[in-house]
Amino acid sequence: MPKIIIVGGGIAGLAAAVHLKAGAKAHDKTVDVLVLERNQRIGGKILTEKIGDYLVEGGPDSFLPEKVWTVNLARHLGLEPEMLPSNDKFKGTFIYSRKRLHSLPEGVMLMVPTSFWPMAKSSLISWPGKLRMGMEMFMPRRRERGDESLASFVTRRLGRECLEKIAEPLVAGIHTSNPDNMSVLATFPRFVQMEQKSGSLIRGMVDAMKSRPHATLSGPPPKPGQARMTYFMSFKKGMETLPQACADAIGKDSIRLGAVVKSIEPKGKGYVVILDSGEKLDADHVMFASSAYDSAEMIKNFDPGLASQLRAIQWSSSGTVTLAFKRNDVSVPLKGFGFIIPRVENRRINATTYSSIKWSYRAPDDMVMVRVFVGGGHHEELVHELDDAGIISMALEELDTVLGLKADAQFSKVYRWFNGMPKYTVGHLDRMFLLDRKVAEHPGIHLIGCSYKGIGIGDCVHEAQIAAEKILKA
């Protein structure tokens, strides 16, 4: 019976454990799986707290059902009745520019316009900027091979104004990174493929929309017992429902909390995992579901070169501020699900989500709860320098400037994620190629999680399942 130790109890490690146990059972095999989590809770950056009458998300507030691996995992765990669609009657994205909020034009897919009239009528982009975006259809393909920054790619295809007012704020909310050094191949490979295949992002996106199934996520009614799908999905009791269900499926005996791994050493055909306590655990396979820089510390003794490559991945820090106001005190309209702010506006916050409007079951009916995002793409120093009172005060000041919201907060909660998000900088795929070759020198070592091949929950689940399947086949 192979012994598999998973270092890290975030969603990648938990999904790997679930897949290992389910896969072994399906093939009448047995595996010995142990998840080691250094903290006293599982879930990693998926953190939900019930505080009084408020359901507060410290990390991601949703997953994308388009990346079906999360949906499949949730269904495997019996969470179909708990899946929660967003309140799409309120949906919409607004962008703060020139001291007011502008609606993101309909038909803009990330940064690519697919409809003429909504863009023509938009107050967000100037007429020269609109013309430059329209000229994208006539721009030549890039002849050079290899990676380039997202900023270079978008400016070359759609113009500087599209980068600054649409692309940068939209992707900053996803990647908490700077487009000036963000790898377009690692973050938006589909756009590169569209340019090479169709010669135009606009043509490529329009063709893709025509060829996709007519039924949308929110289209036909769900089958009996199935949840209605919207672009964003969550769970009635918050995102932590998913890792908790994983833990229940894995079993308490297969998870150890407060287990800090000091190092990993080869031992025969396997490995020995050494804890800070001095305890040593033998394993045939070790899956690193920890951050790349933590994994580097564990590996450095037996492969300094691999550790060096892991340290080459850069990280950013970010924070969220959840605030609740009496509904009667909110005299300004809150349109859509929230707003995003381009870096060129030089504000101290990046975005705000109207949590209790976007989702049900988050706050009492007479309250409005919002979540403000700080750091990441810009003004990252605020996450480190301001205390909780300072960051709350700053968020309230920014909401006043952007929205004209002058209400007093009745509730507040700050979360900080220091070095919590990897930056896929230019050359990331080349680094991953070299990293994969280096890892291949150590059969039984597996790297999973957001550090490598996708930062979203769905990507983490998918890569974890691929690694787990490789172990099962071995």
Image: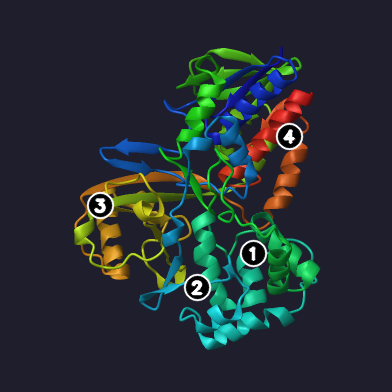
Front residue of 234/268: it is 234
Q: Position of residue 438 (x, y in %)?
A: 75, 37
What mark, if any, has residue 367 been given in the picture? 3
Could you tell me which secondary element the residue under label 1 belongs to?
Answer: loop
Residue holding disc 2: 165
Front residue of 366/215: it is 215
Badge 2: residue crowd in 10 Å (few <14, some 14–19, many ≥20): many
Of the numbered discs 4 and 2, the one sitting upstream in the chain is 2
Q: Amino acid at mark 4?
A: Val
- Whether residue 121 sits left or right of residue 201 in the image: it is left
- Whether residue 447 sits left or right of residue 50 in the image: it is right
Residue holding disc 1: 149
Q: Amino acid at mark 3?
A: Met
Could you tell me which secondary element the residue under label 2 belongs to?
Answer: helix
Q: Specify the quadrant that holds the C terminus.
A: top right
By what rule are the colours in the image chosen? Answer: rainbow
The reply to whether discs 3 and 4 touch (Cβ–Cβ < 8 Å) is no
Could you tell me which secondary element the residue under label 4 belongs to?
Answer: helix
Q: Is residue 414 above or below residue 202?
A: above
Of badges 3 and 1, the one in the foreground is 3
Q: Amino acid at mark 2?
A: Lys
What mark, if any, has residue 439 been given in the picture? 4
